[in-house]
Amino acid sequence: MASIRRTLSPAHRDRSYQNSAGFSSPSNKFLPNGSGKHFPSSSSSSHLRLLLTAVYLVYRKGWRRSFCRCLLFFAVGFIFGVAPFGYTDTDVRAKGLAFPDLKPPPVNLQLDEQYVSSVSLGVTTRLAEQKEVAGLIEPLKQLIVITPTCNRGFQAYFLNRLGQVLRLVKPPLVWMVVEEKAASLETAEILRKTGVMYRHLVSTLNSSSVKEQTVHQRNAALEHIERHKLDGIVFFADEDNFYTLELFESLRTISRFGTWPVAMLAQSKNKAILEGPVCNASQVIGWHTNEKIKRLRRFHADMSGFAFNSTILWDLKRWGRPFSNPVRQLDTVKEGFQETTFIEQVVEDESQMEGIPHSCSRIMNWHLHLDMGNLVYPKGWLLEKNVEVTLPVK
């Protein structure tokens, strides 16, 4: 197909532009409906005229007509999108279109609610709890058990038996074993093997009878407590008696002086008798007694049937003792009166006593009065002759 090329006439080419209004004829071909519309007098309109002029020059080439149209429409749309043609109010809140404020719901805090103030390891928390519990628990009172002993038959048996009982008692406990004249190696070995905290004491006073001997041994232990001001509950536990664990646990409830009934065999060994207090709850209201000669005593208690606070020996102001003489057992009184003369130095009457256990209704120790005087004490715990060994005959 033959192509027709249009050329501008010399008259049209030499046309001058007045007032810089731009060209009219070419620009009208690119506008809709061929009508020329005037844009607002601004910097964007001048840029548009320059762009249209450049596009028109390219448009006359013919083969680039389609590309130029696309470029023209893109430019026109870009300019209309960027150029400000009106006033826009950007203050949204002034028109009442403000977004609602997002606030958390109110929380009512109460002072009594529990909250976590700190975070720590489980081990630290457990140790802290144990310390708090330990601070709330009152520590146990110390028990001071006094036992006189001597070289005689069954001494090793009695000490081992009593030592195994004391080993089962909850600490603190100190066992004062008092010997006469000198401390024996055999007794010291027994005390070491029991596993009980002990003090091995010696009474240097000579005595003609066994009763006087035990009195001096107990006084040696009382002097030791007074000199070192030991704090605890003092209990005279003879080695040949029988004791229950309940008795030692009950001793820790004593405030000043406590007493309880003791079961024992009569001297004739044909009947059992009861000696000790009659109680109404923890109040002492009377005494059990069976022997007429002992009815003259003020207090009917066995030597292993009472215990007292050790501070009575060395703290006179606490208990209001009117005299400063040391509290000791007396060896000048008749046999069977050592207990009552000693108790009279500690308390005035039954109102200062505490009956244990409740209502004094249980027997917690026994006194059998076993006589071991005829048995020979083995020297060095060895037999005089070796034991013969017999082998079976094949």
Image: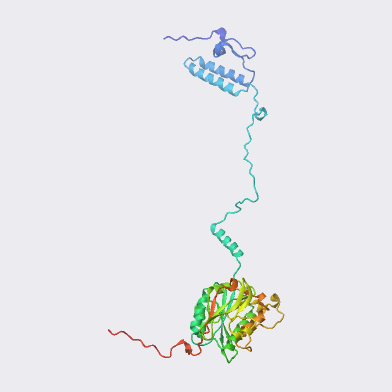
* Residue 310 shows in this picture: yes
Which image quarter holds the C terminus?
bottom left
**Residue depicted at 55% across the width and 60% down the height:** 126
Q: Residue furthest left?
A: 394
Q: Residue 329: give x, y in percent of width and height.
A: 63, 84
Give whichever of 197, 72 is nearer the camera.
197
Q: Residue 10: give x, y in percent of width and height.
A: 55, 8
Q: Residue 106: give x, y in percent of width and height.
A: 64, 42
Q: Residue 144: give x, y in percent of width and height.
A: 59, 77
How many numbered marks, from 0 up? 0
Give whichever of 291, 115 is nearer the camera.
291
Q: Up-down: is 157 above or below 355?
A: below
* Residue 305 shows in this picture: no
Q: Residue furthest bottom?
A: 208
Tell me the colour scheme of the image: rainbow
Which image quarter holds the N terminus?
top left
Give whichever of 61, 302 is nearer the camera.
302
